[in-house]
Image (spheres, helix red, strand yellow):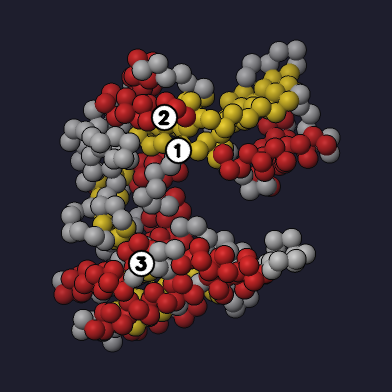
Amino acid sequence: MKFGGTSVADLDRIRAAALKVKREVDAGYEVAVVVSAMSGKTNELVAWVRDAANPPGSNSGGFYDAREYDAVVASGEQVTSGLMALALQELGVPARSWQGWQVPLKTTGAHGAARIEDIDTTRLDQKFAEGLHAVIAGFQGIGPDGRISTLGRGGSDTSAVAFAAALGAERCDIYTDVDGVYTTDPRVERKARKLDRIAYEEMLELASLGAKVLQTRSVELALRYKVRLMVRSSFNDEPGTLVCDEEEIMESKVVSGVAFSRDEAKVTVAGVEDRPGVAAAIFGPLAEAGINVDMIVQNISAEGLTDMTFSLPTDDIAKARKALEAAQASGALKFRTLIADTDVSKVSVVGIGMRSHAGVAKKMFEALAREGVNLKVVATSEIKISVLVDRKYMELAVQALHDAFELEKD
C-alpha cells in the first residue's frame, strides 16, 4: 500500500491512511506500507538545500553536493514513515518503520536521480515472520558509496512497485487524491468515465503522454515484473482502477483514453543537410543536455537541405536552443534557422484495441476536422496516435475525441 503526499499531508490524514492499512491487516494480509513525504515538504527541503548551498553573495553558481542534497531531502519520508508506524501501533497493528538503507534498497550512485538495482528482503521477511508489518520510507535507498540516495521524480511510486515485486505481493495499491484512472481528465471533459481495468501498456502510454495519475517509471516497473496496480483514493472507499496484464481484460475497447500535455513546444531546425548522420547530430546534443523529445518529423528534401521538426516540453526550449547553437558553433551541425512554437499542446488517443482495428486515425482526424482543429504534427505507435494542435484548441480537441470514440459508455 503506497500513500502519496496528499494522503499523508498531516496527522489526521496519516491516521485515516492507517485505518485503511488496518482494514487490510484485519483481512489477513501481511502489509508493506510505502509512504511519501508530507505534501509540500520535499519542495521545502529542496529550497533549504539550495539556500544553504547558495547564500546571498555566493559564487557557487547554483551547484551543491548531491550527496548532501539526498541526505536532507530523504528526511521527509523518514518523518512520515515513523509517524505512520506510530499511528498503526495506536490502532493495535504491530508495525515498525524502515528507511531505505535499513532494508536495504540498493541503488546506482546517481545521487538525486538513482535507479534501483536490488532489494534484499531478508530482514523484512524476518520481521513479517515475527508479526511486524513494515512502513517503508519511499523515494530512497543506499548507493554504492554507502550513502543515502534518492530516486528522483516519482520515486515513491517506483519504490512501492519495486517492493511489491521483491516481496511477491498479491497487489500494489497506490493511494492518491483521485479514485482511479479516467478516460480523460474530468476537469476538461465532464463525461469522463472511471475505468475498471486498464492494461499496463495503455497506462504507460497515458502516463508518458501527460496523464498525472501514475509516474511512467512505476508503470514500466509494474509491466516488467507483472505487478498488479490498484489506483485508489485516500479520501473514500470507492473501488479503484486495476492496472494489469492485457490478458486479464475480457474485451478491450478500441480507444481507452484521451491524454493531453498542455505545455508542449514545437521546434523546427530548418535548412539542415540531408545526409546520413544529421539526425544524430541534432538529437545527440539534445540527449546530452537531458532533453526528452517526443514527436519527430523530417520534411521532404529540397536542394540537398531538409527541415527536422520535433516536440518537447516548453520548459526545455532554452536548453534545446543552447545545445543546438553550441553544436552549430563547434561545426558538428549546420542549420539555417531555429524556429520555436511555444503555443501548442499534445493530444493523444490510446488503446490496445488499435492493434486489431483499422480506421482509428481516420475517425480521429475527421472528429478534429469537424471542430476546425488543425494538426501541426502527427506521430503514431502500435497503440496510440498523438497530434500537436494550437493550445487554444486543446480542450476542444479532447472533448471532440472523447465523444467520437464514445468513451463515456461502458
Question: Residue lying furthest left in this view?
Answer: 27
Residue bearing the label numbered 3 = 9
Which image quarter is the C terminus in? top left
> Which amino acid does the dot numbered 1 rest on?
Ser
Kindly identify the residue that appears in the image at 38 percent across and 55 percent down: 222
> Which amino acid does the dot numbered 2 rest on?
Met
- Residue 32 is marked as none
Q: 59 or 327: nearer the eye?
A: 59
1 and 3 marks in contact (CB < 8 Å): no
Residue bearing the label numbered 2 = 394
Which percent across, then down, holds residue 235? 24, 60
Can you tell which quarter of the image residue 297 is in? Answer: top right
Mark 1, residues whose alpha carbon is within 10 Å: few (<14), some, or many (≥20)?
A: some
Q: 54 or 250: nearer the eye?
A: 54
**Vertical comparison of 114 with 185: above or below:** below
Q: Secondary structure at mark 3?
A: loop
Count of marks, rendered view: 3
Lower position in the chain sequence, tag 2 or tag 1: 1
| Left or right placement of residue 341 versus residue 5 in this view | right
Residue bearing the label numbered 1 = 261
Q: Secondary structure at mark 2?
A: helix
Which percent across, then down, holds residue 331? 84, 35
Does residue 356 show up? no
Image depth: mark 2 or mark 1 in front: 2
**Vertical comparison of 132 with 369: above or below:** below
Which percent across, then down, holds residue 95? 30, 82
